[in-house]
Amino acid sequence: MKQSHITCRVFDLTTIALTALALSSFATVLAAEQPIPKPVTPVEIKEIKSYCIDFNWQGQGRRKSLARPGMWNTANPAAHVAWYKAMGANVIQTFCVSTDGYAWYKNGFVPEQPGLKYDFLPEVVKLGHQEGMKVFGYFTISCNPRWGAEHPELSYGTPSTYHIPYTDEYLDFLSKSIGDAVRKTGIDGFMMDWLWMPKRTSTQDKWLDCEKKLYQQLMGEPFPGEDKLTEKSPQYTAFSRKALDRCWKTIRKAAKEANPDCIIWLTVNQINHPHVVNSDIYKETDWLMNEAGSMEAIRKIECMIGKHTRLVTCMALWNGQDASTAVPEALAAGVGLYGFTAPKTGDGLIPLDSILERQVCELTGDDLNIAVLARAYHGKSVDALWKDGEFVEPANPPPFHISLKGRGRGMPDRASISHEKDRASVTITSPYGKGRATLTRNGAQWPASVTIRLQKNKGESATAKSFLLANGQAGFSATLDGTNTVASGAIEGGLDLGRAWGDKFPLKPVSQEPLKVGVNRAADAIEIVVPPDLTKSNPQVLAIEWN
């Protein structure tokens, strides 16, 4: 070591500099001759089959709350890509920056998630592309608690909702965040969420000085005062559309300059909101999703989008869509599919086997959405069974499907169907003494024998006192208090099977002998045998209520 040190010192400094310059030039030439390998990119997808394990949240169902920074920091990219592959998805939507304000890749413009174990997003991109999937990141546009805390004068300080006005300072930050993520991670595009005006509840609807300045900047007139800018005033709508449009154009410029092929995916939870309808945002975005999930609402905005814009609908617990009917409707209309829910395990995953191995009707909420989407993504029916890691169509599908009325914020009902030859039964497990469901015929004929079993959840004491059933033209009501009193007859003018009847069940007395309804009681359940007279006309739907 000593001899080498002495030898180096006698070199002429000019010689050293020239040598270093020559080596540098040689390396540059060599690099120029060897083009940077392009990532493996998936082929263009014909049908959008997407999902998101949502790192924005912790908890399940309606008891979710925003995840704290670093909450899912051990998420394994390989395990996550394998999960999406098992789902049959061709689009992975994960995160550039989640709602906590921290990034899901390392050494970027935005600080990474505290304790991030893997360089998550770039690894998901690499592995997802190898599987032929597109990979999208995500930004919450009007929410970034980390940035808001660092710039309190530019934030309304309510990080659980929209809290950031679209000032020059914030748009500069947002532009750099987006450009950095697109350039460094290899994503095919990103979803932008919460592109809304800020809520001012933390200041009792008083505007920050920075937003007053923004108003004057965009409207070309002095700020008129909060009393003139109520939520529904034309003046506020005009300002909001200008602010959102300027933000959108900043987003689009940053993304397309970083990668002209970057796909920008806008999700909107109020797709007919006056701040965004008939805007350049709708015309210029690449993908547009109605997070509320209504296909009727999607049809209303089809005339507002660009020729290149692709439409997507969403299956999520909050929007109350019935995936078993909404998914086939979207597929038939050529509308893309998407779903999301929070992770269930510490490594940021959702166990799939326990969901996919069960009948769709046995599941509720986001588990039901996952089960229906997975079958659709694999090109299978809702009746397909999960065996040895794949879906298999049953040789003898169930003769009917059941749809249970949602409970809003209450605990959900569940059901299971069993059938053989000309007999079928459905067991409904309910935590309440009242509920509603429809049975929709799947086969050519109703089975000769149909039994409906109302079963209580373990530990629940609620018991139904009556049971109603109708096929639209006739029906019956039966007491379930031990007397088993039955009233039956035709329904004058027909009955809407899609609406609850309650005590308004208009049975018209008939001269013929009343229907014979079998009511059997057990310790934890009541069985009702449907009279064959109500199924022999082969109605499409039977509707039931218990209360």
Image: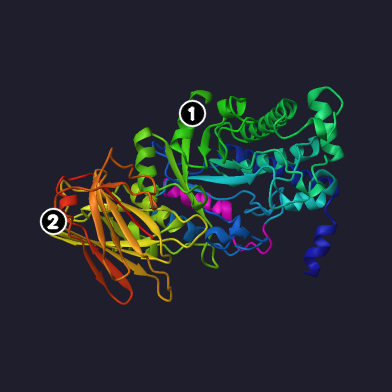
Residue 57: quarter of image: bottom right
Towards the viewer: 333 or 286: 333
Q: Is residue 414 visible?
A: yes
Is 34 left or right of 330, judged from the image as shown?
A: right
Is 473 left or right of 177, judged from the image as shown?
A: left
What amino acid type should be assigned to the residue bearing mark 2?
Answer: Ala
Q: Which residue is mark 1?
A: 300
Q: CA distance from mark 1 to mark 2?
A: 44 Å
What amino acid type should be assigned to the residue bearing mark 1?
Answer: Lys
Q: Earlier in the sequence, mark 1 or mark 2?
A: 1
**Magenta part of the chain:** 113-132
Judge whether 483 appears above or below 383 on screen. below
What scheme was used to colour the molecule?
rainbow
Judge whether 384 appears above or below 141 on screen. below
Q: For the point 34% across and 47% down, which residue is it?
A: 376
Towards the viewer: 178 or 126: 178
Crowding at mark 2 (Cα within 10 Å: few <14, some 14-19, many 20+): some
Q: Which mark is residue 503?
A: none
Towards the viewer: 468 or 394: 468
Judge whether 422 appears above or below 250 on screen. below
Q: Position of residue 26 (x, y in %)?
A: 66, 42
Q: Which mark is residue 448?
A: 2
Judge whether 488 appears above or below 455 on screen. above
Quadrant for the C terminus in the image? bottom left
Q: Position of residue 193 (x, y in %)?
A: 61, 43
Q: Position of residue 43 (x, y in %)?
A: 41, 38
Residue 296: quarter of image: top left
For the residues carrying marks 1 and 2, which lies nearer the camera in this image?
2
Q: Secondary structure at mark 2?
A: loop
Q: Position of residue 312 (x, y in %)?
A: 47, 38
Is 54 left or right of 116, judged from the image as shown?
A: left
